[in-house]
Image: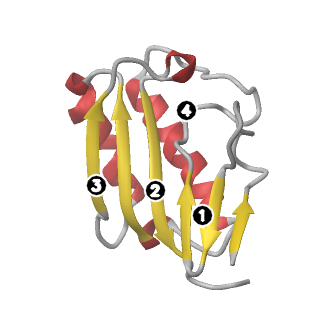
Amino acid sequence: MLERIRSERAPKAIGSYSQATKIGNLIFTSGQLPINPETGQIDEKDSIKWQVKQSLNNVKAILEDNGSSMDSIVKATVYLDNIKDFSDFNEVYQEFFEKSYPARSAFEVAKLPMDALVEIEVIAEVENEG
């Protein structure tokens, strides 16, 4: 059964989409921008490292509040404003995984909403139903 899910610890959607969808034992997140859920803004417009950390914290909140975790991510898709930021992106990204890294694709895109430097979406397995 398809279920729209969310986390109060992640930013509200800025458009007509759900934070995530759960179907079976999989969670599909929408792309998570580096929006601070407390301010509703991208607090550090020029820092790729800060933005990656915030985007991943948003992903983490959605997963943890819905029976999953970063280590249960099957696939991540990353959109970068500038592919030259890939090294700095990767440095922060690897800090979020304890066991192993999921499959991943990364792309440079022409422009992201709110002039973000990064957007990250994932597919993760649900670990428990509680």
The reply to whether callout 2 and callout 1 are in contact (CB within 8 Å) is yes
Name the kind of residue labelled 1 in the image. Answer: Leu
Q: CA distance from mark 3 to mark 4?
A: 18 Å
Q: CA distance from mark 1 to mark 4?
A: 16 Å
Location of mark 2 (residue)? 122
Location of mark 4 (residue)? 34
Location of mark 3 (residue)? 104
Q: CA distance from mark 2 to mark 1?
A: 10 Å
* Rendering coords of residue 107 (x, y %): 27, 35
Residue 27 is left or right of residue 16, and the answer is: left
Sequence-earlier tag: 1 or 4: 4
Is residue 32 positioned above or below 70 on the image?
A: above
Name the kind of residue labelled 3 in the image. Answer: Arg
Question: Label 2: how many residues lie within 10 Å, few (<14), some (14-19) or many (20+)?
Answer: many
Question: Label 1: how many residues lie within 10 Å, few (<14), some (14-19) or many (20+)?
Answer: many
Location of mark 1 (residue)? 63
Q: CA distance from mark 2 to mark 4?
A: 15 Å
Sequence-earlier tag: 1 or 3: 1
Q: CA distance from mark 1 to mark 3?
A: 17 Å
Question: What residue is drawn where x is 55% and y is 32%?
Answer: 34
* Rendering coords of residue 67 (x, y %): 64, 75
